[in-house]
Image: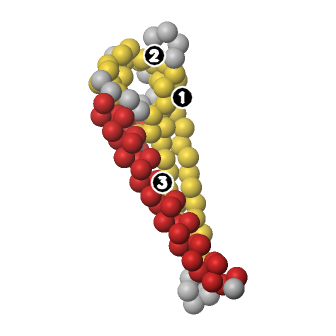
Amino acid sequence: MLFDIIFYIVPIFIFIISITIIIKGISQWKYNNSQPTLMVSAKLISKRANVSTTMHNHPDGVGTHFDSSTSYYLTFEVEGGSRLEFHVGGHEFGLLVEGDTGKLKFQGTRYLGFDRQ
């Protein structure tokens, strides 16, 4: 009986989580598209990288394999003291230095670029 419950509940649970993630992504995309594209004076005040590592055991039971991925974030301070953090690619992350000033271009939560002055 426990097996029957797990056999039916776990796939339903996974399906609900998947649908929730998809709906959240679509609503964020729609929100960003409905926002105006803004270009404001800003200063890069912080850079951070988040490294995630996953361990996989080989099917034959001999050894393990590690996968890692890095997410990059930039935090800008705009006029008035507000701070905005954006998820960016590694290339953009590498080009900028804390303390850079310039024009930040964004749309909602979507980072569109930074032109250094």
Q: Is mark 2 on a helix, strand or loop?
A: strand
Give the residue type that dot 3 points to. Thr
Q: Which badge, 3 or 2, comes first in the chain's sequence?
A: 3
The residue that disc 1 covers is 46
Residue 31, compared with residue 100, is above or below; it is below
Indicate the secondary structure of the residue bearing disc 1: strand
Q: Mark 3 points at which residue?
A: 20
Q: What is the quadrant of residue 101 in the picture?
A: top left
Q: Which of marks 2 and 1 is nearer the N terminus?
A: 1
Residue 77 rendering spot, x and y as whole percentages: 49, 19
Residue 19 image-quadrant placement: bottom left
For badge 2, the amino acid type reads Val
The residue sitting at the top extreme is 80
Scheme of colours in the image = secondary structure
Q: Is residue 36 above or below residue 91?
A: above
Let me know if residue 46 appears in the view: yes
Give the quadrant of the C terminus: top left
Name the residue that disc number 2 marks. Answer: 78
Residue type of the residue flagged with mark 1: Ser
At x 56%, y 46%, the residue is 50
Query: What residue is at 56 percent from the left and 82 percent from the top?
Result: 58
Residue 100, how many percent across, how many down?
Answer: 43, 21
Q: Earlier in the sequence, mark 1 or mark 3?
A: 3
The mark lying in front, picked from 3 and 2, is: 3
Q: In this view, does 105 lie to the left or right of 96?
A: left
Kindly report which numbered mark, 1 or 3, lies closer to the viewer in this rendering.
3
- Taking the spot 49% from the left edge, 37% from the top edge, the residue there is 73
Q: Distance between the residues labelled 3 and 2?
A: 33 Å
- The alpha-carbon separation of the residues under discs 1 and 3 comes to 31 Å
Give the residue drawn at x 53%, y 13%.
81
Disc 1 to disc 3: CB gap under 8 Å: no
